[in-house]
Image: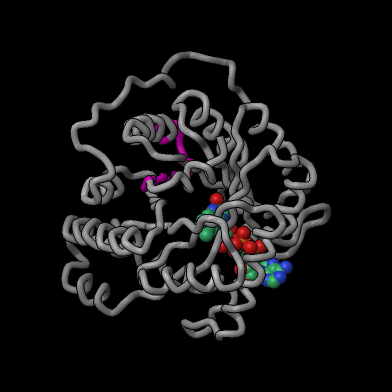
Amino acid sequence: EKIRDAATEEGKVVFSFEFFPPKTEDGVDNLFERMDRMVAHGPAFCDITWGAGGSTADLTLEISNKMQNMICVETMMHLTCTNMPVEKIDHALDTIKSNGIQNVLALRGDPPHGQDKFVQIQGGFACALDLVQHIRAKYGDYFGITVAGYPEAHPDVILNGVATSEAYQSDLAYLKRKVDAGADLIVTQLFYDTDIFLKFVNDCRQIGITCPIVPGIMPINNYKGFLRMTGFCKTKIPSEVTAALEPIKDNDEAVKAYGIHLGTEMCKKILAHGIKTVHLYTLNMEKSALAILMNLGLIEESKISRPFPWRRPTNVFRV
Ligand code: FAD
């Protein structure tokens, strides 16, 4: 099933979880256990990231396969153009297609480590738009294609903390080109100012982007991680968030509790504006994401986790 259909079901609020490929085998096992517990709560879909520079390609393919066929959740695999000649891109797409995965998040990716600017490799693509066009041209309607949207504009065009209005508008126009080329869902970059997200949705509608726009919510788990992430993404931190965090920044439990409170309030406001999906960047942790969903009344505390089907030995889904 394409996740776009799940995200647009009339009247129903749905949620989804993002995970990333762990570095160790134990980490992978733990992730599947956690995923299995989280999937028991009924997300519309789960997605798995593509490591920076293509570093996790094989593992991402393997994890996405198990998510779809053993954890049995509708799966979206991220795919970036960094260091990927078209043959490698097609290998990834052919693999997930043969495993029954119908959803891909088409991204340009960041420049490889140590490089400032994204440079197209020989035989590869220059931007996510190229990738969307390629997927539609080669695979027709088989895949649901999601693309990234940036409520504060892409960090490349944010200078000294702000994007000029021209840069913001040109970023939006480019997003529309990705949608016009065949993307059918937008997931946003993380943000902490809900008004910025709501304005972004409005601005997208103004220029004729009609597909669902799913807010990416990253619960604050610890102070240092929060600063690193918002610094990297050039995310605006509202003054009330800074004021709330400053006195508790050395108390991990208090920061986590505040993160759950803030995530809940953000989602409440977004849902009150008619958005029907919340996408949680879990960072492979379950507590904050589930607590937020519980606060929103979207899941029940008592839900018993299912047995772990992935434990069954199988060679069927090797990539
Ligand atoms: P693009 O959409 O191609 O472009 C990014 C920006 O560059 C545009 O917004 C625009 O400002 C400008 N631009 C590019 N091409 C053009 C053009 N032709 N004309 C005009 N402007 C242009 N990274 C990973 O490595 N792995 C992941 O799994 C991953 N998952 C992500 C998931 C989400 C939801 C988001 C928001 C980001 C994710 N990223 C991931 C990060 C992403 O790869 C980076 O933000 C990257 O710098 C841009 O990728 P993109 O697909 O947005 O690029």
**Image side of residue 105 versus residue 15, left or right:** right
Vertical relation: 59 (above or below) 211: above
Judging depth in this view, the residue of 297 and 254 nearest the camera is 297
Residue interval drawn in magenta: 12-27
In the rendered image, which quarter contains the C terminus?
top right
Is residue 54 one of those drawn in magenta?
Answer: no
* Total number of numbered discs in the rendering: 0
Residue 223 in view: yes
Judging depth in this view, the residue of 142 and 9 nearest the camera is 9
Give percent across and percent down for residue 86. 78, 46
Give percent across and percent down for residue 37. 32, 31
Quarter residue 130 falls in: bottom right
Judging depth in this view, the residue of 16 and 205 nearest the camera is 205
Quarter residue 274 falls in: bottom left
Name which residue lies at 56% across and 85% down. 165
Is residue 23 one of those drawn in magenta?
Answer: yes
Q: Quick check: which quadrant has ligand 1?
A: bottom right
Name which residue lies at 83% across and 52% down. 123
Name which residue lies at 33% across and 45% down. 285
Query: Residue farthest to the right?
Result: 123
Give percent across and percent down for residue 222. 28, 59
